Amino acid sequence: MTANKKTTGTTKTSMTNTGKTLRIAFLTSTMLAGMAHAEDVTLNIESWRNDDLTIWQEQLIPAFEAGHPGIKINFAPSAPAEYNAVLNSKLDAGSAGDLITCRPFDASLDLYNKGQITDLTSLAAMANFSSVAKSAWQTDDGAATFCMPMASVIHGFIYNKDAFDALGIAVPTTEDEFFAALDKIKADGTYIPMAMGTNDQWEAATMGYQNIGPNYWKGEEGRLALIKGEQKLTDPDWVTPYATLARWKDYLGDGFEAQTYPDSQNLFTLGRAAIYPAGSWEIAGFNAQAGFKMGAFAPPVVKAGDECYISDHTDIGMGINAKSAHPEEAKAFLEWVGSPEFATLYANALPGFFSLNSTPVAMKDPLAQEFVSWRDKCKSTIRSTYQILSRGTPNLENETWNASAAAIKGTETPEAIGARLEAGLASWYKPTK
Amino acid sequence: MAAKSFRWHIPVFLAPAVLVYTAIMIIPLFGTLNLSLYNLDGQNRIFVGLANFKTLFGDPRWSASFWNALGNNAWFFIVHMLVQNPIGVLLAAILSSPRLRMAAFYRTAIFVPAILSFVIVGFVWKLILSPIWGIAPGMLDWVGLKSLYLPWLGKEAYALTTLALVSVWQFVGIPMMLIYAALLNIPQEVLEAAEMDGITGSSQFWKIKLPLILPSIGIISILTFVGNFNAFDLIYVSQGALAGPDFATDILGTFLYRTFFGFQLQLGDPHMGATIATAMFGIILIGVCIYLFAIQTRLRRYQF
């Protein structure tokens, strides 16, 4: 007992000594490093893309810093679900980073109107983007652009190619073929036909309703008519997608009501589910995780020969905090973000985030190529609830989450959902005809 | 002899506690109450009196959320009162029996969950109950009851009760410990006297011990009430701040968090958040007052 105690004592002393030496060594090295970069400016980026942290640190930031000595970039993301709230409190408190990753449309417009992010219309790189690409970050009259567009995401379905081959299923193009394929997978029993849960609610809206919906409301035509007040959410074009979602219920895994978003991703990448209603942002993660061949198909059209529509949603941009102490350096960074060089780097480092740059970008990833090829066949639109319709309370996008989850679970009829959403929207939105 | 000199040491010794408590409890509390009387008019904060409360109780959307949260909270509390506290009393009664072997082991094992973090408890139970990776469906399958399995956390009808029972599992050790201590406090002479009168076994528990531990049960009830109406962590960890499915597990704590800090697309609104916090404060205050004036004064106390 005594001997033991003594040994411990000695070890402790020697460890403290080593600790002291180490600490001094560390301190000296930090001081030296600090002196070497004393005049560098560090720009902090606020973002919700915490999945992309390593890509920023290993590929994008070194590429920028190599060409811009004196500017250091620190990518500091927060949790996606908390981003809007965290960013707003940070901006109000004056502690937000220099560069702000912009959500599309009303969320960022609100920041601009409050004077929290600056007008970037005069940046030279803005010329690299079409007016459609910029529309997500402009004032309603298009006079001012306040975020540099970065990327859009496309909705569709990713499928397990091995499963489709083994069961002899052809890629569905119409809704009948789609449900026939699901029936076949279900009858076989090896795979869960479709990986989706309603626990987190947003997948049901984003990867469900906004994924298949454009084929019903004819993309931009319906979306703009809704904003103009020529169509209502109780119209068949807006209600039928909920009826289709309700049919998905039978093809989801057991207990899908408690299945979370990561659960669904894992079910698919572990090869237990055959079809995954997707957004293209999944591609990078799925490539890394899945041990089987994957393919993708666009949302099936209602009848063969119908024109197809896809959700090609301008999703991510970047602006400058009005209170930034280094606006010139931040502008230099955004000029680079708007350059073709960044577009190529970004689109290949993050397959599935498609560049909005007018310069065509060569992408190497086959799955990403498949997604982007639909732009030639189908008409593009953006998510119906984002522009203008989410400015008031109740926020239509928020309501759509809950509604889509209810539709899939079958707890509310499509007609009741349409009526509820229309009543909520009509309570604050008066379309200007 | 001159008038008693002022006893300076009393305020001096009280000062640290009073200052710290005022700085971190009293001032924030009044700050919150005060904030609920203001709102934004464009960019400026203006005094609006009770208008926020009018919105909270008068606007159909706000009031529906509020009453839903309050109703869920009441159910959360009822489950605790009906399950946690009786089980706690029962466990304490069993533990205090001199014939029980390994009492120390059971006592520790039952109390351990109470010192676990909410994050661990929420996450572990979410995994246990998960329809995909969980062991609950498998275990029910072994005993041939797979048909009873449901994705409880995802069903509106069951989610809240499930979470309440998880919380009961976590905290049943606390009433057990308090009652256990109260039971040990009963003097041996009283029990011996009871035995002389022929009162033994369970009738001894009902007729002698229970009346003597009633004040402790009262304290536990009020602790449960305050704890439940302030609850937030478990729901947030397992269901997120949207308290799904379809707000079925939304209690006042998550409703307050969502409103005050914002979540997903909803932006934070400190003024309405403070209004909800004030309403919660009022509810808890009323509950505690009812206990203090209507129940505690009627409890009979015995001096030994």
Image (cartoon, coloured by chain):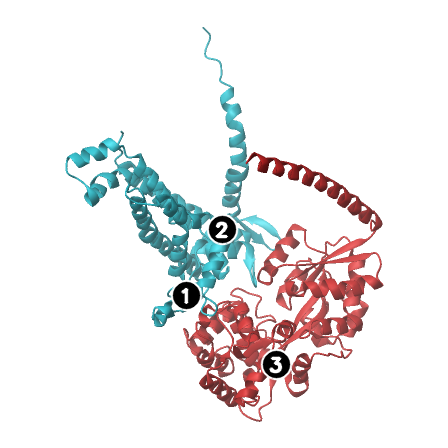
Chain colours: A red, B cyan
Residue at the image point whose x is 81% and y is 69% from the top: A124
Q: What is the three-letter code of the residue carrying label 3?
A: Met
Q: Quadrant of the N terminus of chain B?
A: top left
Disc 3 with disc 2 on a shared chain: no
Q: Secondary structure at mark 3?
A: strand
Tell which subunit mark 1 falls on: B
Residue B19 pos. (x, y %): 54, 32
Please state if A189 lies on the left or on the right of A329 as rendered. left
Can you see residue A82?
yes
Q: Are marks 3 and 2 in contact (CB under 8 Å)?
A: no
Q: Quadrant of residue A42?
A: bottom right
Q: Nearer the viewer, residue A174 or B105?
A: B105
* Residue that badge 3 annotates: A294
Numbered circles on residues, count: 3
Residue A89 pos. (x, y %): 62, 54
Q: What is the three-letter code of the residue carrying label 1?
A: Ala
Q: What is the three-letter code of the residue carrying label 2?
A: Ser
Residue A55 pos. (x, y %): 71, 66
Disc 1 with disc 2 on a shared chain: yes
Please state if A38 lies on the left or on the right of B162 as rendered. right
Q: Please tell me the numbered disc located at residue B136.
A: 1
The residue furthest left is B197
Q: Please tell me the numbered disc located at residue B117.
A: 2
Residue at mark 3 to residue at mark 2: CA–CA distance: 40 Å
The answer to whether residue B287 is above or below residue A87 is above
